[in-house]
Amino acid sequence: MSATDGQPGLAENSWGTNPTEQRQTKLEEMLHEWEMESNHGDRLGPFEREALSGADAFWLAIHAFPDIDKAKVKKRLDTPFTYMLGDSGLSIEGGGLVQQYLKDAFLTGAHLKKAILRKAYLKGTNLEGVDLEGADLRGANLEGASLRGANLEGANLRGAALREADLVDANLRGVDVTKADLQRANLFQADFRKANFYKADLQGASLVRAKLGGANLSHAVFGMRTDLGQAELGDKKLGFVSVADTIWNDVILASADWSPLLKGMKLGDDKQEEAPVAARANQQLALALRAQGLNAEASELDYRARMWRLKDLRQKRRFLAFIFSGLIFLVSGYGYRPIHSFGAYAFTIIVFSLIYWHIPYGYGVHGEPHQLPWWPQALILSFTSFHGRGFLPSEVTGSVWHGAWAAGEAVVGLLLEATLIATFTQRIFR
């Protein structure tokens, strides 16, 4: 029987197929020799440095569990392993086959889609180009393993050991690496879009040109030796990374691409609509970027943090603080939107000029009101009152009410000028 009989759609020697009878005999001999040897020397397993195909690994998995009903499994040897997972519960879990026999083995091109490999011992294993889409690798040991070009989209790697692993050009979209150890891993050009790095250890990892759009970096740990060179932190469809409580540890942030922030792209934390978290995320990243001289990006994030705090005040019904903070936003844009200052100034001048125009400064013999022309007298009165602290200019004649409103405008002008000076001084000397 050939390796692919009864298995349509599976390539020869891929996971889910059986090796030839001659190959099975050789594998059994290698296992037997290993068991008979009293001293293995430096060898860590019977298949160390042996080039194992996906079919070899599949066949070994079937024969590595003494507690499995062989008669039940034997009649399904020619069916894909992923099918039997749902039918017989077969998995490579804990120690078992992988811990005993597959360290430093070569599994290039194996078909492991949706395989259960919890706590599997795959240290130093060659898994280049392997299809591990949707695989369960929770707690697996993949230290030093080669996963170049591998497909791990949607895989579960929570708590996995990937220290010094090679994941160059690997597809890890949507992968869950929560609390995984990725220290000194090579993640060059890896696709981590929508990945979950919650509490993952990335100290010393190389993320050069990695795609991280929409990824969750909350509570992830970076280090001074982590390389973010040209890393893509934003994606037009998936958005920017989430960074609440990320531990940056002096990683060089300037080498990554933060430009989408200046083009209106928001942090992933902003999409959660949780004001305290979003405010904290924006503020924390602003401080980290400003410390490394990225002032434009830091200023944008600081402004967003203030806007989230304003929203938080409203949600918590702290109305007095909300009104005060809202006025500062309207008047100065918290110092980050100068156009607000010009708008507040123009609005004040125009509103008070309309008041002066509307108030009569006297009445005619028939009782008709005499009003100041809006242009230029009323406008001049408003302008000079704003800056002149309520004194009517000599060239403008007005009533006592004009003087009262002029005094009021002077107070408003004083408050606006003080607010603008304080806000912009705080920003400039931050």
Image: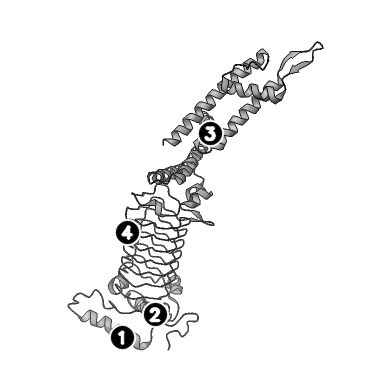
* Contact flag, marks 2 and 3 (Cβ < 8 Å): no
Which numbered disc covers residue 55? 2
Q: Tell me which amino acid carries mark 1.
A: Lys
- Image coordinates of residue 293 in percent, x first then y, are 40, 45
Secondary structure of the residue carrying tag 3 is helix
In the foreground, 153 or 80: 153
Secondary structure of the residue carrying tag 2 is helix
Q: CA distance from mark 1 to mark 3?
A: 79 Å
- Mark 2 or mark 1, which is nearer the start of the sequence? 1
Q: Is residue 324 left or right of residue 176?
A: right
Alpha-carbon neighbours of circle 4 within 10 Å: few (<14), some, or many (≥20)?
Answer: many
Kindly identify which residue carries mark 3.
332
User: Please, which residue is most extreme toward the top here?
Assistant: 365
- Mark 4 or mark 2, which is nearer the start of the sequence? 2
* Contact flag, marks 4 and 3 (Cβ < 8 Å): no
Kindly identify which residue carries mark 1.
26
The residue that appears at 50% across and 35% down in the rendered structure is 334
Q: Tell me which amino acid carries mark 2.
A: Ala
